[in-house]
Amino acid sequence: MPKSKFVDFKAVKAAITMEQVLEHYGLLDKFKRSGDSLSGSCPIHKGSNPTQFSVSVSKNAWNCFSECKHGGNTLDFIAEMEDVSILAAANKAIEWFHLDPEAVYGDSEPEAEETGEETKNADTTRPKPVATPAPVQESGAPNKPLQFRLDKLQREHPYLAERGLTLETLVDFGVGFCAKGMMADRIAIPIRNVEGAVVAYAGRWPGEPAEDTPKYKLPQGFRKSLELFNLDRAVKEPSDKPLVLVEGFFGCMTLHQHGCRKVVALMGSTMSATQEELIRKYTNAQSQVIVMLDEDDAGRAGREDIAVRLARFVFVKVHAFAEEGHQPEQLSAEEVAQVCGGVQ
Ligand SMILES: [Zn+2]
């Protein structure tokens, strides 16, 4: 991988079709065609039910209604089939389909034009008024997709059971206990960018850490203020569903487990300018956002600020918990259905 080149995922996706990708795997003939859709058994989890996997030919999208319980675009499909990152999948597609390097490689990583001020205050400054739908930019380069994946994560861990997460949710989010390496002895949580590429792993200490041990470990250089956890999947949910905004990974995963799938986590109790822009980009004037931060001082301060900022372009509802200290994880499935159902 030449370091100075970056892959333009959009260009790669625009250059290939799901039919081509299926053909590459020798699967195209095995699928049943009906109008715009192709269906068959899922080649990712290697299922046997012939209706569980379907492809929209015109949208170049796929979905597995069975074990995988998700879908995606051409690159997501290659990434799943090869068990690699989106970046690696894109590089494979470039190679397999002989895509034009001019079209799919950018010249260089966008360099930081300015440093200092803006970055430093990114989490607290009010965003500048945006005259045109500007691209998401804080100064500095975006988080780069990782070139590796942590595998052999242990899904069965007392801490994860204690947090009430089911095996299905853990598999779905790719979360598990990491025995060795960078995130050794921690619960590794993959953080993906909106394209679905893993840009970092967050390592949660399983339990209350000792004083000198941080609760969360993030890779050096990774800037969480540039991402919204689970945004890549939330954006695939229907636009008329409200977007739920929570603080942490576990709140996000819990709501998701209870059926509230259009949920993202700020990874803190403040919203950065970039996170605000991401929300703006993937919502419209009819969109609804439910702000559900933890019921503590930081959460209350954060939600006031966030509500004011988001209310300029979406409908906002602030969810307050009745009890001090409560957070999304304390909601039952019924309560989640009620709260996340919509904004009145
Ligand atoms: Zn599947």
Image (cartoon, rainbow, N blue to C red):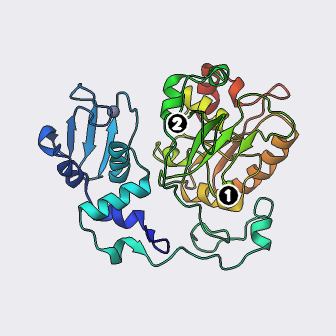
Any mark on residue 162, and which? none
Under circle 2, the secondary element is helix
Residue 70 versus residue 93 in the image, above or below: above
Q: Which residue is mark 1?
A: 223
Residue 147 versus residue 191 in the image, above or below: below
- Quadrant observed for ligand 1 in the rendered image: top left
Residue 172 position, x and y percent, is 48, 33
Q: Earlier in the sequence, mark 2 or mark 1?
A: 2
Residue 182 position, x and y percent, is 62, 45
Residue type at mark 2: give it.
Phe
In the picture, the quarter occupied by the C terminus is: top right
The furthest residue to the front: 180
Dots 2, 1 in contact, CB < 8 A: no
Q: Which residue is mark 2?
A: 173
Horizontal relation, residue 172 to residue 339: left or right: left
Q: Residue at x 68, y 24 (%)?
A: 331
Residue 283 versus residue 249 in the image, above or below: below
Horizontal relation, residue 145 to residue 89: left or right: right
Residue 318 position, x and y percent, is 73, 40
Question: Splitting the image into 4 quarters, where does residue 162 fall?
Answer: top right
Question: Relative to the observer, which residue lies in front, 188 or 162?
Answer: 188
Residue 164 versus residue 84 in the image, above or below: above
In the picture, the quarter occupied by the N terminus is: bottom left
Residue type at mark 1: give it.
Arg
Horizontal relation, residue 182 to residue 233: left or right: right
The furthest residue to the left: 29
Q: Residue at x 36, y 71 (%)?
A: 104
Residue 93 position, x and y percent, is 30, 59
Mark 2 surroundings within 10 Å by alpha-carbon count, few (fewer than 14), some (14 through 19), many (20 or more): some
The Cα atoms of the two marked residues, 2 and 1, are separated by 20 Å
Question: Splitting the image into 4 quarters, where does residue 97 fall?
Answer: bottom left
Under circle 1, the secondary element is loop
